[in-house]
Amino acid sequence: MTTQTQLILATTAVLRNAQQLTTISNQEIGLVSLDDLIATSIGIHPLVFAQQSMLSEVTQQALQQKIADQYGQQTVALAEYYVSMLTELLVSAARQQGTAPLKVQLIGADSSARQQLLGAELETVEVNPQLGLRGASFFADVNYKPSFSLQCEAIKRARATLGGENIELVVPFVRTFSEAATMIDLLAEQGLCRGANGLKVHMLCCVPANALLAETFIHYFDGFVVDVEQLAQLALGQDFDNANLNYRIDTQNDAVIQLLKMLFAVVGSTAKDCDIYCRSIEQSPRLQRWLNDHEITSVIC
């Protein structure tokens, strides 16, 4: 078991809700979590946009009330409400970030994390959500494409409002090269072409295969953001949602550090970035020292 220690690394914040835009005004935003922003500020399940007619009457009324609370008697489509709200959040975050890049992580949470959203009755129950429909496979699924299109529309509007280049994308949970290529194609179909108007697209490394095959994955993306907890979870077969197993969480295990070495070796031979995202960095003194020894001075946490 690890204990909390004094940080020897600088930190940047993860933006998870709108209230943080006032509380982290003096700290750089290292990552924007669209999963969390949507959950805390919008609250609409992504399947609603493809299967709204299948919702219960109670859920339909709750969705209409959301729009009424925002726009009063003005008639606004649910999709426009969703895009406008998300665009406003992204623009506010980007303006606070100034000229520094704002890395926006696309929706990548598992199905269990979507159960609290309006319309969750449409969600299929998965036996193992952590290994289910999420990240790249989620975006490619026909039922989720309408939601993906709206997410992309919000990003395009935000980039257009700001003049373009400081909003960058982070694609989560990419299992294979095929999924990497598919994601770049899907984004291009939505008008978010990698390289166009300076758009950078990064990969969230959370699957051991991302490190083992980093030399090929890097060609699809402009850099990596490494989610150390998810990498540890899958490398060590851990279940972070099981309270009885919490003592086994180990983000500084030799296996995790070996995977980080592989990623650093590949990125070091390019001019691309590799950011470290670790929620429990204060409880990982060995990892802190190791990162510091490898000239990493800042982590997202």
Image (cartoon, grey):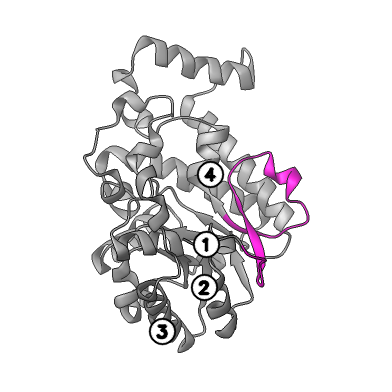
Q: Dot 2 lies on which element?
A: helix
Residue under label 4, please give it.
154
Residue 79, numbered circle: none
Question: Pointer 2 and pointer 1: residues touching (CB < 8 Å)?
Answer: yes
Q: Earlier in the sequence, mark 3 or mark 1?
A: 3
Amino acid bearing label 3: Val
Specify the quadrant of the image occupied by residue 186: bottom left
Residue 201 drawn in magenta: no
> Are the residues flagged by discs 2 and 4 in contact, CB closer than 8 Å?
no
Tell me the mark number nearer the camera, choosing from 3 and 1.
Answer: 1
Quadrant of the drawing holding the C terminus: bottom right
- Cα–Cα gap, marks 1 and 4: 27 Å
- Alpha carbons under labels 3 and 2: distance apart: 19 Å
Residue sitting at x 55%, y 41%: 37
Q: Is residue 41 above or below residue 288?
A: above
Nearest-to-viewer mark from 3 and 4:
3
Q: Which residue is mark 3?
A: 266
Nearest the eye: 158 or 222? 222
Span colored in magenta: 5-31
The residue indicated by pointer 1 is 278
Q: Is residue 5 visible?
A: yes
Residue 246 lies, in percent from the top left, at 41, 51
Pointer 2: what residue? 287
What's the CA distance linking mark 3 and mark 4?
Answer: 33 Å
Q: What's under tag 2, amino acid-wise?
A: Leu
